[in-house]
Image (cartoon, helix red, strand yellow):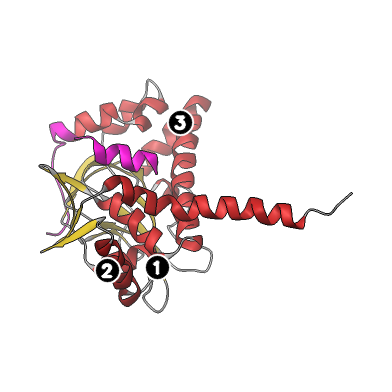
Amino acid sequence: MSAVFSRIRSSSSAGASDARSSAASAAWRASRFRNALGSRADDLLVDARERKYSAGSRVHSLEMPTNVLPGLVVHGLARIYTMSAQGRQVTLRYCRAGDVLGLSVLIEPLVVLDGAALYIQAVTPLNLLCISQVRLRKLVSRDANNMWGLFTEFARALLHSTDMITQNIFSPVRSRVARHLLDLAENRGEELVVQVSQQGLANAIGSVREVVQRAIVNLCQDGLIARQRHGYVIQDPERLLDAARSFTNHEASRSVGMGRQRRLPG
């Protein structure tokens, strides 16, 4: 959560390009993933391809080939989510510039235990540097240090997803909405702007639009956010962060109190 806040405080269909842009090359050189893989990491660029996705389009689903994954986010924001048979969605992870998504395709297709698919969507216009699965497997199989680099990226993704799942399960809607507003916020001049609909927020937190609408009204009345034509402006980032964290702190104290009440004498 603190990483989300520090980021905020600092100032058409897909198609493969024939060459990598300078931005893609720069993003690769600066990425944690490349640095973790060691001296032979740049071998992965031999047949890497850059792809661009329009906002709202799917990067991956079960009906699409997996040859675009894994991929390094060069620019933009991607969302990894799952969806129930009834169409209810919940976000598992957001990926920004420098993050790698889709590494699990090296092991098995993006399917969760009950058979529901994991989907990847471009939240904003998205540039993705797509890495060859075959070449990455060969690279990590040659050297244990390379395998360690892959493991650390897996662990980072798992911790991020676990944090988001925990909040989506245990936090009240107000805290969950506050968290996702912070995740989606972008600097626009002097303002922090979130371009998202109430249905988009409902999809993100695994709820329904009517419930999210009540939380939005509450946050607006408290002066934390304000409506604008295509979304919201964050008016008080500090207090919105407190709203996103409040349930965790409350539950921690409550758990300590309950533990004391249950302690038996003697």
Left or right: where 227 falls relative to 209: left
Does any portion of residue 10 appear in the rendered image?
Answer: yes
**According to the image, label 2 marks what residue?**
217
Q: Nearer the viewer, residue 116 or 62?
A: 116
Dot 2 lies on which element? helix
Q: Quadrant of the N terminus?
A: top left
Part of the protein shown in magenta:
1-23
Q: CA distance from mark 3 to mark 1?
A: 32 Å
Q: CA distance from mark 2 to mark 3?
A: 44 Å
Sort mark 2 into few (<14), some (14-19) or many (20+) by Cα contacts within 10 Å: some
Q: Foreground mark, 3 or 1?
A: 1
* Residue 253 locus on image (x, y percent): 58, 51
Q: Foreground mark, 1 or 2?
A: 2
Kind of residue at badge 2: Val
Dot 3 lies on which element? helix
Residue shown at 39%/53% (left/top)? 244
Q: Is residue 111 magenta?
A: no
